[in-house]
Image (cartoon, rainbow, N blue to C red):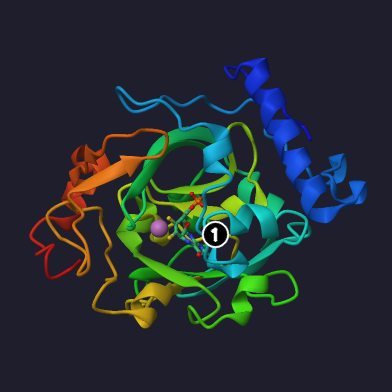
Amino acid sequence: MLIRRPGLKESQVTDHRAYLNRRLFLAAGAASLLPGPALALNLAGYQKGEAPAGEKPTPLEAVTTYNNFYEFGTDKDEPARNAPGRLKVRPWEVVVEGECAKPGRLALDDIVKPHRLEERIYRMRCVEGWSMVIPWLGVPLGAVLARFEPTLKAKYVHFTTLADPEQMPGIRSRVLDWPYVEGLRLDEAMHPLTLLAVGLYGAELPAQNGAPLRLVVPWKYGFKSIKSIVAIRFTETQPRSSWMKANPREYGFYSNVNPAVDHPRWSQATERRIGEFRRRDTLMFNGYGDQVAGLYAGMDLKANF
Ligand SMILES: Nc1nc2c(c(=O)[nH]1)N[C@H]1C(S)=C(S)[C@@H](COP(=O)(O)O)O[C@H]1N2
Ligand SMILES: [Mo]
């Protein structure tokens, strides 16, 4: 892998590589599945990020072994056990379609390469009540989307995850309506905090974290951050996400982190930061209110949950 980055301690880098290689090796039982130079994005020279005040990144081991990726099983440890070595991330193409002047089918590199890679260290909060702080590596989604020239009719962006039963043992189960789909309002998608991530901790995304390309929307519950994206569609009407289809009473389109709006079956007022013992108060918009509250000015956030 091409990994040469400023800022990360060499021990962290070595740990990460060793860790990923061990995972791949264990899952695949074959050295041929270790990442080789042919499949490396050049991650060198990215712009370093800063953790939110008072926050420390969650250890890599937790970020890569405690996951939700239902295509690989619904238990937290199943994505790390089932995805590496099974999910084939090269070659990878993304179809961009719908209300835009320049639709197309792009290879992963062609999506990412025209942009400067940035590290963004974001709080992530799952609707289930746990949270992490993750150093993502990616490009602002807005800059990518702008290249396709959305038309005036484009009001929303719809995203689709790969759904391949050969690679994804979890999609034999009917727990969700596959493929996994999600949506954002166009202004949410264009917001500078919204990231199209290709890596974490300075290296390529592990399969279980949504390789090779996933969304990161830090002020919304984790499930909005759709993994392993194969299609992006500009639409005039509001998309229905997989979670809305599964349970519209519990999961709405907006899904903004909001301690004042409880999930029908549990409170959202507090959360457990993975690695900590005592629960913390959940922050409105996950602590990103200064930057994103304006997107929802005048909206009733209890009705638009
Ligand atoms: N395709 C797909 N994307 C997904 C999910 C999933 O099951 N399938 N789970 C979501 C949920 S509930 C969360 S909390 C985050 C978890 O991301 P992480 O495992 O990288 O922390 O991914 C989200 N993206
Ligand atoms: Mo989640």
Residue 133 seen anywhere in this rendered image of the structure: yes
Q: For the residue with label 1, is its CB less than 8 Å from the closest atom of ligand 1? A: yes
**Residue at image x 53%, y 26%?**
47
Residue 47 versus residue 265: which sits nearer the camera? 265
**Disc 1 residue type?**
Lys
| Quarter where residue 14 is shown | top right
**Residue at image x 52%, y 66%?**
74
Q: Where residue 160 sits: x, y (%)?
A: 53, 71
Q: How many marks?
A: 1
Residue 44 seen anywhere in this rendered image of the structure: no
Horizontally, residue 163 falls left or right of residue 183, namely: right
Residue 130 versus residue 165 in the image, above or below: above
Q: Quadrant of the C terminus?
A: bottom left
Residue 129 versus residue 49 in the image, above or below: below
Residue 268 versus residue 136 in the image, above or below: below
Horizontally, residue 251 falls left or right of residue 164, namely: left
Residue 270 versus residue 235: which sits nearer the camera? 270
Which residue is label 1 attached to? Answer: 227
